[in-house]
C-alpha cells in the first residue's frame, strides 16, 4: 500500500475515534483527534500515562492550532515563525476553548507546526491538529520504527503508518515558552 493510501486509512481511523501511530521529526508518535475526549483518554490508558498530563498538538499549518492558542504579543512571533515548520514545540497560553483533557490552562498548550511530511500530510487530510505523543509506554524509550510500535502496542492501537522518522539523532524536539522564549526541553 502506498503512503497516500496509508494516510487516507489513518485519517479515516482518526475520524472514527481511533488511535494512529505515525512518524514525526524524532520518533514515532501516537495520535488522535484532540477534540475526541474518549480517544485522548484511551491514549493515556494505552501509554500508562497520568490522564491529567498535557499533550502536544501538531499540525501542518498554524491555522489548525490557533483555536487552542491564546493571542500573544506580535513581538513574540518572530522566533516562532522562523522555527516552523520544524522540530520546535512552543507552549502558548491556552484559550478558553482548549479542552481540559488536552492541557493545563495554567501551564498552557504545547503546539508544533511539523516539518515531517507524513505527519503534516496526515494533519492536512484530517483538516485539524493531531494529538502527538511519543509512541512508548510512559518511562520507556520511544519507538523509532513501525515494527517497534507494533511490538510495543500490538492490538492496543488502531493503525500504523509505515514510513521513516526524520533524523534528529534520536533527540526529542525542542520545547520553548512562547511568552518568554525560554527553553524548557
Image (tube, grey):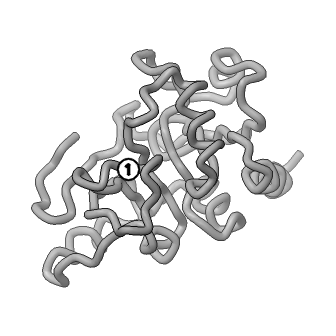
- In this rendering, the answer to whether 71 lies above or below 134 is below
Q: Position of residue 99 (x, y in %)?
A: 46, 57
Where 38 falls versus 106 (above or below)? above
Pick the front one: 28 or 42: 42
Callout 1: SS: loop
Residue occupying image coordinates x 45% and y 73%: 67
157 vs 165, left or right, is right
Q: Position of residue 149 (x, y in %)?
A: 64, 25
For the N terminus, which image quadrant? top right
Residue 36 lies, in percent from the top left, at: 63, 52
Residue picked out by circle 1:
103
Q: Please determine whether, in this image, residue 104 is positioned above or below residue 77.
A: above
Residue 28 quadrant: top right
Observer-nearest residue: 3 or 93? 93
Q: Position of residue 138 (x, y in %)?
A: 44, 21
Residue 3 in sight in this render: no
Task: Identify the image quadrant of the C terminus.
Answer: top left
Q: How many marks?
A: 1
- Residue drawn at x 69%, y 64% is 126
Amino acid at each position: 500500500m502506498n503512503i497516500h493510501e496509508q494516510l487516507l486509512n489513518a485519517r479515516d481511523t482518526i475520524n472514527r475515534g481511533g488511535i494512529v501511530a505515525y512518524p514525526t521529526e524524532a520518533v514515532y508518535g501516537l495520535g488522535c483527534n484532540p477534540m475526541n475526549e474518549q480517544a485522548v483518554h484511551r491514549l493515556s490508558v494505552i501509554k500508562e500515562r497520568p490522564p491529567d498530563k498535557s499533550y502536544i498538538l501538531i499540525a501542518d499549518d498554524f491555522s489548525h492550532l490557533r483555536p487552542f492558542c491564546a493571542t500573544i504579543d506580535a513581538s513574540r512571533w518572530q522566533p516562532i515563525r522562523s522555527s516552523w515548520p520544524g522540530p520546535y514545540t512552543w507552549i502558548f497560553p491556552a484559550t478558553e476553548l482548549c479542552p481540559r483533557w488536552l492541557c493545563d490552562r495554567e501551564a498552557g498548550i504545547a503546539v508544533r507546526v511539523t516539518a515531517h511530511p507524513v505527519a503534516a500530510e496526515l494533519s492536512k487530510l484530517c483538516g485539524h491538529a493531531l494529538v502527538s505523543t511519543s509512541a512508548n509506554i510512559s518511562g520507556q524509550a520511544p519507538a523509532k520504527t513501525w515494527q517497534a510500535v507494533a511490538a510495543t502496542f500490538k492490538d492496543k492501537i488502531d493503525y500504523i503508518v509505515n514510513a521513516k522518522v526524520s533524523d534528529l539523532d534520536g533527540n526529542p524536539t525542542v520545547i520553548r515558552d512562547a511568552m518568554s522564549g525560554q527553553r524548557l526541553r
